[in-house]
Image (tube, rainbow, N blue to C red):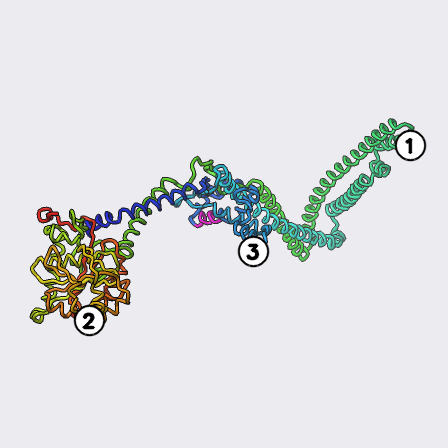
């Protein structure tokens, strides 16, 4: 990579680079300042590596640490729609100014243009829209390989960003705790179902053992009467009878209280207090029926309600006492049953004893299972009220002081870099593919022909009419030296191509052309012709631009007839000398044009008259130089190229489009003879890149 060439490129395209970079940077700056700022707030959540269980502290101490997949799973749960939907509901985001439901601008445009009616979103669409907005605003990520999860929310308002970040964290922890409680309650429900089934089995097992004893007890007593079995049985019968009476009494009292049958309730209670309250109630009812004033009625009703409340209290107290007695009797019954079982085991024959013990074993096992299930149910019920979440908030979000987007210094810095890159890139494209040529390397790479001469932009000398005067007035200038360089390369190439020399008396025909107009080809043609003339050669220059002749202006001559008149036949051949003039500054001879052609110029070029003119000129002059029109706009130059031994193709520095140059050179190459040579010369170079470091000692401007 040639650093000097890079510097030259930047210097040549500096204006385009600066304008492009400034434009891109200005647009980026406007967009940055036009964007609504976005604030980011973050909450940090710690996923505890130990699963929380208050009722089992040993499991907390020995629990396995949370592995990486578990933490990643919690990250996905935090991102889930379940958590976000809970936040939408708790924060009422459906009606929020930023995240709430809004009618899309496209729908408004379609409605305004009457393309489609404006329809408000349905409930499902509204929720989906809010959910999508919230999902885009939320970022959940694990901090490295730690147990810390960051929840970030972007919002147009800093307070809103912090509020939503904390709300997401709180919803996640609350839902996590609810899930644990739900699991416990679901397990408890399963255990309760098992308890009901176990209770039935206990009752069945105990009933089977009791029925077996009842079936065989009479036979045992008759065959071997013992006082203990008789006493136990009598006591059990008494307990059953008393329990039945007490249960019936409780049922009756509750029915009397529910139906407010106070008379029957007092009879069931059968106490002095209940009888006294009943008499008092009856007296109050009689007084109430005989009361005349409203005041007395109110007082009597209040007193009546108090009496009835006292009766109800007596009944409830009696129920409580009877139920306590029933519990005691149940305990006694169980004790008696155990004593009966023990006595039965001692008195029963071996055959009956084995079967009874089996029934008793089944009853014991079902009873133990039943007790375990009850204990498990109580444990699950307690755990469901004492659960703790496995995650906790370690750093709640705070309202940020500065927006997170756009980061103006960073964005402007990147915009500056991109703008500069865009400017350089556009300059590169313009220089190498769109704009004109500026270096010899470009010319050779694009056209396939080397650049043989670079002619600097030359100012007119004092009193001069053309830049070509520099060959006479400034023979040691850089411009003159490059014209002579072009001359030398043409001579060397033609001589190398035909080392035996040309036919005696036949000169060399040189065509000077370009791709477009106003590239300085006439100036280059005249300069080259004068260079040959100053070198002592006989030279004829022909103004071949029949549509826009300009060579006569370089000589400051206005002719009444020109070469167009000669070729069209309006000027006789013997008067050809009227269009031929001699250069006042050199020995150069010029065939000038005087006016524009009024007929298609290609007809003039293809006539035998033009061919004969060139043939006669080649016999008389050592060099015949034709100043042709540009080959891009008109075809005349292509016909003239058929007669040329060499073609000088003029390209204006940093001006002529490269594509136009390539197309024009290809056209000229197709029109030339196979032995003709093409030379590319660059004109009007305004840079100082082609100056040699030691050139100051050789050039005199």
What span is colored magenta in the figure? Answer: 69-76
Q: Is residue 394 left or right of residue 434?
A: right
Return the x and y of residue 547 as percentages of the image width and height: 26, 62
Helix, strand or loop at mark 2: helix
Q: Which is closer to the viewer, label 1 or label 3?
A: 3
| Above or below, comparing residue 209 to residue 602 in the picture | above
Q: Main secondary structure of the magenta part?
A: helix
Helix, strand or loop at mark 3: loop
**Which residue is at a point 75% across and 36% down the rendered structure image?**
321
Return the x and y of residue 529 as percentages of the image width and height: 13, 59
Residue placed under numbered mark 3 in the picture: 115
| Above or below, comparing residue 685 to residue 378 in the picture | below
Q: Is residue 177 left or right of residue 268?
A: left
Residue placed under numbered mark 2 in the picture: 609
- Packing grade of label 1 (10 A; few <14, some 14-19, many >=20) is few
* Real-space CA distance between mark 3 and mark 2, rounded to the nearest whole angstrom: 73 Å
Residue placed under numbered mark 1 in the picture: 289
In reply to whether residue 376 is colored magenta, the answer given is: no
Quick one: 73 or 560, which is closer to the camera? 560
Mark 1 vs 2, N-terminal side: 1
Is residue 512 shown to the viewer in this render?
A: no
* Real-space CA distance between mark 1 and mark 2, rounded to the nearest whole angstrom: 155 Å
Return the x and y of residue 149 as percentages of the image width and height: 44, 43
- Packing grade of label 2 (10 A; few <14, some 14-19, many >=20) is some
């Amino acid at each position: 990579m040639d650093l000097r060439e890079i510097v030259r490129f930047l210097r040549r395209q500096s204006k385009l680079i600066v304008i492009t970079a400034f434009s891109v940077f200005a647009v980026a700056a406007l967009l940055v300042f036009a964007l609504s700022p976005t604030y980011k707030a973050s909450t940090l959540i710690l996923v505890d590596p130990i699963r929380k269980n208050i009722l089992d502290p040993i499991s907390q101490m020995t629990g396995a640490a949370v592995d990486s997949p578990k933490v990643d799973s919690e990250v996905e749960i935090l991102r889930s729609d379940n958590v976000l939907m809970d936040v939408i509901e708790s924060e009422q985001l459906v009606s929020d100014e930023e995240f709430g439901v809004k009618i899309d601008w496209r729908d408004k445009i379609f409605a305004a243009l009457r393309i489609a009616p404006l329809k408000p979103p349905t409930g499902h669409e509204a929720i989906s829209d809010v959910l999508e907005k919230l999902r885009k605003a939320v970022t959940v990520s694990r901090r490295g390989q730690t147990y810390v999860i960051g929840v970030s929310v972007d919002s147009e308002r800093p307070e809103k960003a912090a509020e939503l970040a904390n709300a997401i964290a709180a919803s996640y922890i609350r839902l996590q705790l609810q899930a644990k409680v739900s699991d416990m309650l679901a397990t408890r429900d399963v255990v309760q179902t098992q308890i009901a089934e176990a209770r039935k089995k206990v009752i069945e097992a105990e009933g089977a053992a009791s029925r077996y004893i009842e079936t065989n007890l009479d036979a045992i007593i008759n065959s071997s009467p013992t006082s203990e079995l008789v006493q136990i049985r009598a006591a059990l019968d008494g307990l059953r009878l008393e329990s039945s009476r007490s249960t019936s009494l409780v049922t009756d009292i509750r029915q009397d209280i529910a139906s407010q049958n106070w008379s029957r309730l007092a009879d069931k209670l059968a106490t002095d207090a209940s009888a006294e309250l009943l008499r008092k109630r009856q007296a109050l009812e009689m007084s109430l029926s005989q009361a005349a004033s409203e005041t007395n009625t109110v007082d009597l009703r209040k007193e009546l309600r108090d009496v009835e409340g006292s009766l109800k209290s007596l009944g409830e107290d009696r129920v409580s006492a009877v139920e306590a007695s029933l519990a005691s009797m149940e305990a006694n019954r169980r004790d008696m049953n155990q004593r009966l079982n023990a006595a039965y085991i001692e008195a029963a024959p071996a055959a009956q004893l084995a079967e009874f013990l089996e029934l008793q074993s089944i009853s014991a096992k079902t009873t133990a299972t039943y007790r375990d299930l009850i204990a498990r149910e109580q444990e699950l019920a307690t755990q469901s009220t004492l659960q703790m979440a496995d995650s906790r908030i370690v750093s709640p979000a705070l309202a940020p002081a500065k927006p997170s987007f756009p980061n103006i210094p960073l964005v402007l810095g990147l915009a500056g870099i991109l703008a500069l890159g865009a400017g350089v890139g556009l300059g590169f494209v313009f220089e190498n593919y769109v704009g004109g040529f500026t270096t010899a390397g470009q010319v050779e790479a694009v056209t396939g022909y080397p650049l043989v001469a670079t002619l600097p932009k030359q100012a007119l000398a004092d009193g001069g009419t053309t830049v070509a005067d520099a060959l006479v007035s400034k023979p040691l200038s850089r411009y003159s030296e490059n014209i002579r360089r072009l001359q030398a390369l043409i001579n060397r190439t033609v001589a190398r191509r035909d080392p035996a020399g040309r036919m005696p008396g036949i000169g060399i025909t040189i065509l000077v052309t370009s791709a477009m107009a106003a590239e300085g080809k006439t100036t280059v043609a005249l300069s080259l012709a004068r260079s040959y003339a100053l070198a002592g050669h006989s030279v004829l220059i022909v103004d071949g631009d029949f549509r826009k002749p300009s060579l006569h202006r370089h000589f400051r001559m206005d002719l009444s007839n020109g070469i167009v008149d000669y070729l069209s036949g309006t000027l006789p051949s013997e008067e050809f000398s009227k269009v031929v003039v001699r250069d006042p500054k050199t020995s150069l001879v010029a065939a000038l044009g005087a006016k524009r052609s009024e007929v298609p110029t290609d007809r003039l070029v293809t006539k035998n008259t033009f061919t004969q003119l060139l043939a006669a000129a080649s016999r008389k002059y050592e060099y015949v130089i034709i100043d042709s029109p540009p080959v891009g706009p008109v075809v005349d130059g292509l016909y003239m190229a058929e007669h040329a031994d060499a073609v000088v193709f003029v390209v204006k520095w940093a001006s002529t489009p490269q594509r136009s140059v390539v197309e024009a050179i290809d056209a000229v190459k197709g029109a030339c003879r196979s032995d003709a040579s093409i030379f590319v010369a660059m004109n009007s170079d305004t840079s100082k890149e082609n100056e040699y470091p030691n050139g100051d000692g050789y050039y005199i401007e």
